[in-house]
Amino acid sequence: MNDHLLLFLVLFPLLSVGGIALIWIGTSGIRKAREQEERERVRAFGTVIDLVRHVSLRRGKPPVCHPVVEFDANRKTHRYESRTGYWLDRVRVGERVEILYDADDPSRFHLEELFSRQIAGEKVTVLAGILWIIAAGIAAFVLSR
């Protein structure tokens, strides 16, 4: 085995670690979102009646809001805080939103429009990981020459 090939075989895995991590994070997010989508299938419309602001203790992480949504399900009016947080400008108090909820537990719901954006973001993360690995391959090839 020549030295160039050996150097490539050492460099490529080292440079690919970040890409592999991004792919894992993105696919994990997509899998969790799909599981949530399977549970929360009943469609309803509700109104955002409050935004509960959650501030992270980690420095530099922006605050997120968990919308409190009121909606009718199973002949009752329900009012729950979303388990998912969104950036401040994504929803507003008084806004009418489409939600999907779990028929067995209406407190488990997601906002349909924002959920689609979340899945798109996870796909972008996977794509970034793939591009990272391609760039790692090119860099390892160039550096090993």
Image (cartoon, rainbow, N blue to C red):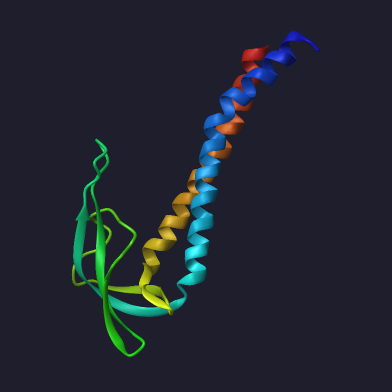
Residue 44, image x and y in percent? 37, 80
Residue lying at 51% horizontally and 55% vertically, measured from the top left: 30
Q: Where residue 122 sits: x, y (%)?
A: 48, 50
Residue 86: x, y in percent? 30, 56
Q: Is residue 102 left or right of residue 34?
A: left
Image quadrant in which the C terminus is located = top right
Q: How many marks?
A: 0
Seen at 25% across and 45% down, the residue is 56
Vertical side of 125 occupied by 33: above or below? below
Residue that protrudes farthest toward the bottom in the picture: 75
- Residue 16 pos. (x, y %): 58, 29
Query: Farthest residue toward the top?
Result: 3
Q: Answer left or right for 108 relative to 2.
A: left
Please, is residue 74 above or below residue 130 in the view? below
Q: Height in image: 77 above or below 136?
A: below
**In the rendered view of the protein, which quadrant contains the N terminus?**
top right
- Residue displayed at 49% across by 47% down: 124
Residue 59 as seen in the image, left or right of residue 106: left
Q: Residue furthest front?
A: 104
Query: In the drawing, does residue 76 fall left or right of residue 22?
Result: left
Q: Could you tell me which residue is drawn at 29 percent across and 80 percent down?
A: 71
Q: Is residue 75 above or below residue 56?
A: below
